[in-house]
């Protein structure tokens, strides 16, 4: 299948080994796109770029200069920029009252100002059949505890996505969010390694499994292709989780305590 | 083995585009339509792997008859697409009970029966799913789409309860809705052409879509391809807006 043949795609947040951005980058390359990978670990970017015959460009999403450099370099190299995916994020877990001002500013820079400026730079530079994809989260729709800075910035930028889609649709630019739930990914791996944690989340997933990055990549191919007439939407690809809820803090504590207890027995 | 999809209202408009696209991707298609003659014409044109049956989606007996015929003919469904629908531009003051019941019977009861039949008769596998063609107007009504919008909102809610129930029962059958905006169907183009001021009406419909045009039937079919494919295996209970931003 070459559903993205002739397209040039930029995946930002692809500098972590086998993270969601890399899974998307691999899939886009397999669909025939020219792929530019961005992120902050240049060595790893070069490795994935080599693997998929793409291009590595260093980019810190909190830097407008980096964003502009990535966009202009991509267009110089490939002549166009058709699909841009922001797969960056910071999964900070901290009680609401304990969120420090420094953490809050870092979160806003990474998950609100960064994605905002990402879109700001893109709308004036993309092709006339363009797709911007913001990786959001089920938690921007349903709650989860100790994650307020994360879920608030994700929900905030989803609403900006709607506004940008509304304003720039006439230029042929579609803008959408993709919302997976808890994903079998390097970002979630330390949490999923806590005994009991996987089970307490899993019980809320109607389809009986957690997300994979492949689910997200498949939806991104659909959003990136020219046959997609969707814009301004937040596509829920979480096995029906957002029809329900996440486990409560008390349930999470209970499952972890029970798992720890059964380990000792 | 190729997958088998049943499309209600598959003889024309969006349903026809879905049937054509799935068939072009080597799926077997079962066109179920009240207009059996038009369905037959399309099935004959598509050729091998295309079948046609008459179906009144509002009748439980008709659905059961159809399911029996499929069993007799050795056809097992993987996908059921509840696409048949009717519409009328009428405000609440212009809508009498007869019109309300007529629209609700096709667009809401028809989808209810389709979901019920789907759970009972689809092959229970990870690649089985039900897709309900709702509407952007089911998410956001216009003053003149009283019964239509209510019926399409019902389809969204039916999608959610069916998805949750099916998952809880372990059936493996996903259920999702697609919400198109205004789409270039023969029906819409005719109603524009026959209106008092076609240019003004076309301009009005276009103006509802931020991307500056109305949708194409093939774009709804592309969304069906995504949702019906194994790649959307973790997608259930969603309302997919394919509306060029109409509901923003």
Image (cartoon, coloured by chain):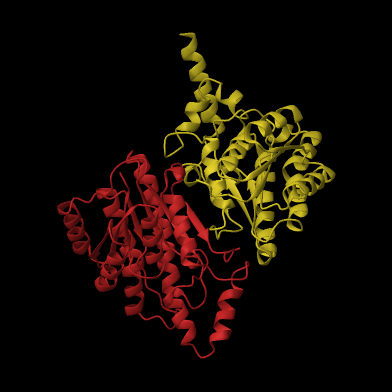
Chain colours: A yellow, B red
Furthest toward the bottom, the residue is B196
Q: Is residue A207 above or below residue B78?
A: above
The residue lying at 61 percent from left, 74 percent from top is B207
Viewed as shown, does residue B26 lie left or right of A217?
left
Nearer-the-camera pick, A150 or B79:
B79
Q: Is residue A254 above or below residue B16?
A: above
Image quadrant assignment for residue B146: bottom left
Nearer-the-camera pick, A221 or B201:
A221
Viewed as shown, does residue B47 lie left or right of A253?
left
Furthest toward the left, the residue is B72
Q: How many marks?
A: 0
Picture quarter with the N terminus of chain B? top left
Question: Which percent across, then down, holds residue A81?
Answer: 70, 52
Picture quarter with the C terminus of chain B? bottom right
Image quadrant assignment for residue B18: bottom left
Q: Kindly tell me whether residue B238 is visible in this rendering.
A: yes
Nearer-the-camera pick, B39 or A6:
A6
Viewed as shown, does residue A176 lie left or right of B54?
right
Question: Which percent across, then down, holds residue B106?
Answer: 32, 69
Q: Kindly tell me whether residue B90 is visible in this rendering.
A: no
The residue lying at 47 percent from left, 61 percent from top is B220
Furthest toward the top, the residue is A265
Question: Which percent across, then down, holds residue B163?
Answer: 39, 48
The residue lying at 49 percent from left, 14 percent from top is A261
Question: Which percent across, then down, holds residue A53?
Answer: 65, 36
């Amino acid at each position: 299948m070459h559903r993205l043949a002739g397209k040039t795609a930029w995946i930002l947040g692809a500098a972590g080994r086998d993270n969601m951005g890399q899974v998307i980058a691999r899939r886009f390359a397999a669909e025939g796109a020219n792929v530019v990978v961005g992120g902050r670990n240049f060595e790893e970017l070069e490795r994935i770029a080599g693997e998929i015959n793409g291009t590595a460009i260093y980019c810190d999403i909190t830097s407008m200069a980096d964003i502009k450099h990535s966009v202009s370099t991509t267009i110089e190299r490939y002549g166009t920029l058709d699909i841009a995916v922001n797969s960056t994020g910071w999964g900070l877990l901290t009680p609401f009252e304990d969120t420090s001002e420094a953490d809050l500013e870092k979160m806003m820079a990474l998950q609100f100002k960064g994605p905002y400026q990402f879109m700001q730079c893109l709308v004036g530079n993309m092709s006339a059949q363009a797709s911007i994809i913001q990786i959001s989260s089920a938690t921007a729709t349903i709650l989860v505890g100790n994650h307020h800075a994360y879920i608030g910035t994700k929900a905030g930028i989803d609403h900006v996505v709607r506004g940008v889609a509304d304003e720039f649709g006439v230029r042929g630019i579609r803008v959408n969010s993709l919302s997976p739930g808890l994903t079998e990914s390097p970002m979630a791996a330390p949490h999923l390694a806590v005994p009991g944690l996987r089970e307490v989340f899993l019980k809320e997933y109607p389809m009986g499994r957690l997300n994979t990055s492949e689910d997200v990549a498949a939806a991104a191919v659909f959003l990136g292709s020219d046959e997609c007439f969707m814009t301004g939407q937040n596509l829920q690809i979480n096995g029906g989780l957002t029809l329900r809820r996440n486990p409560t803090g008390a349930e999470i504590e209970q499952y972890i305590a029970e798992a720890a207890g059964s380990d000792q027995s | 083995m190729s997958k088998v999809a049943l499309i209600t209202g598959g003889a024309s408009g969006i349903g026809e585009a879905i049937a054509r696209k799935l068939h072009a991707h080597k799926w077997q298609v079962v066109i179920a339509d009240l207009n059996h003659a038009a369905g037959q014409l399309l099935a004959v044109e598509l050729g091998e792997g295309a079948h046609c049956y008459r179906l009144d989606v509002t009748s439980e007996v008709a659905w059961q008859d159809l399911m029996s015929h499929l069993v007799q003919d050795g056809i097992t469904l993987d996908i059921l697409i509840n696409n048949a629908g009717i519409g009328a531009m009428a405000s609440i003051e212009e809508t009498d009970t007869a019109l309300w019941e007529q629209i609700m019977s096709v667009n809401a009861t028809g989808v209810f029966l389709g979901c019920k039949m789907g759970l009972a008769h689809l092959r229970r596998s990870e690649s089985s799913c039900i897709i309900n063609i709702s509407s952007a107007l089911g998410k956001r009504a216009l003053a003149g789409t009283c019964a239509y919008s209510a019926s399409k909102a019902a389809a969204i809610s039916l999608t959610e309860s069916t998805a949750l129930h099916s998952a809880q029962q372990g059936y493996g059958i996903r259920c999702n809705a697609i919400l198109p905006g205004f789409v270039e169907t023969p029906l819409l183009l005719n109603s524009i052409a026959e209106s008092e001021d076609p240019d003004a009406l076309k301009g009005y419909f276009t103006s509802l879509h931020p991307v500056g045009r109305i949708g194409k039937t093939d774009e709804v079919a592309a969304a069906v391809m995504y949702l019906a494919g194994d790649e959307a295996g973790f997608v259930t209970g969603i309302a997919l807006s394919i509306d060029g931003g109409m509901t923003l």
